Amino acid sequence: KKPLLQVNNLKQHFPIKGGIFGRTVNHVKAVDDISFTIFEGETLSIVGESGCKKSTTGRAILRLDEKTSGSVLFEGKDLLAMSKSQMRDMRKDLQVIFQDPFASLNPRQSVSQILGEALAIQNVIPANKRRERIIELLSYVGLRPDQIDRFPHEFSGGQRQRIGIARALAMQPKLIICDEAVSALDVSIQAQVLNLLKSLQRQFKLTYLFISHDLGVVRHISDRVMVMYLGKVVEIADKKSLFDSPKHPYTQALLSAIPVPDVTKKQERIILRGDVPSPINPPTGCRFHTRCPYAVERCKTEVPGLTSLHSTHQVACHLVEQ
Ligand code: SF4
Ligand code: MG
């Protein structure tokens, strides 16, 4: 498998100014030194509770926020080292689909205008051929040609997300970052949109970075899963290993909260105390130690590194190292 995106030591530390001289007194370590690879044609999901900095990681890759360091190699080229204009050219290859398509679609533009604008930016299809191409894009996402002149409010939530997907496809991207892309939809509609994403992936050889707090959704769509906790990667594995034998206590807790499809499998619910702590003063040692049911003394001082259990399963926990 060929790597499409290689993230190395990605950090995003925002300074906090304070005192009468406005000096930097502290840093919010939003994303703290994470590394991972996304291979061509796969779906890698990022999961975790809200506050685990899943979206921030997605945004950092696209350089949507300042104060990002490390490297993000896309087909070997470092996105973080590119000039603004180089980055603008790269953006076509890297598209994003957000949770709320309504917020990202201009309500005063018809579908043909929305997709026409994307095609104008992409600038591959001549202007007189664009309407034809828009109809083709609509057919890919299961919308009808006669819907081309309608406005976003005339569509259902699921259909609007289909328009968002068509807009991303218009760019002929290689990587699509789906940030809670189906979270706002009803469960039955979610499955339809996930199946659509899967079939488009096969058809157009797309690679997905799929960000979601919903493990049911992640189980449906992923090839591999990366679990984040407070700006750190705590476990990364192929889907089967992660769901069948999660090793990190945080992953185990997340999984214990979703209903088991196999009723013969007994499962005890692990209840986590409290919320994800603030990234301004994250817990020392293992960041999860304040909520971990298995924490020992060592966890309060020593940061666990990612250890490989086998080639497709890594976990950052002192218990697993032993
Ligand atoms: Fe829990 Fe310690 Fe493992 Fe962290 S390192 S997950 S606190 S057992
Ligand atoms: Mg988010």
Image (spheres, rainbow, N blue to C red):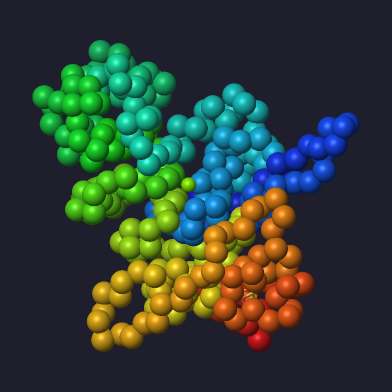
Residue sitting at the far right: 21
Total labels drawn: 0
Q: Residue at x 82, y 43 (%)?
A: 25
Q: Tell me if residue 241 can be seen.
A: no
Quadrant of image for the C terminus: bottom right
- Answer with left or right where residue 20 lies relative to residue 36: right
The image shows residue 283, relative to residue 145, as above or below, that is below
Residue 145 image position (x, y, % from top left)? 13, 27
The location of residue 259, given as percent across then percent down, is 31, 71
**Where 46 falls versus 126 (above or below)?**
below
241 left or right of 288 in image: left
Where residue 3 appears, x then y in whole percent?
A: 52, 55
Q: Quadrant of residue 288?
A: bottom right
Q: Residue at x 51, y 63 (%)?
A: 227
Position above or below: 167 against 187? above
Q: Residue 34: x, y in percent?
A: 63, 56
Q: Image quadrant of residue 9? A: bottom right
**Viewer-proximal residue, 134 or 113?**
113
Q: Residue at x 38, y 58 (%)?
A: 214
Q: Is residue 27 visible?
A: yes
Front residue of 258 and 126: 258
Q: In this view of the protein, which residue sits in the foreground, 274 or 307?
A: 274
Q: Going 52% across and 33% down the picture, which residue do you hit?
A: 90
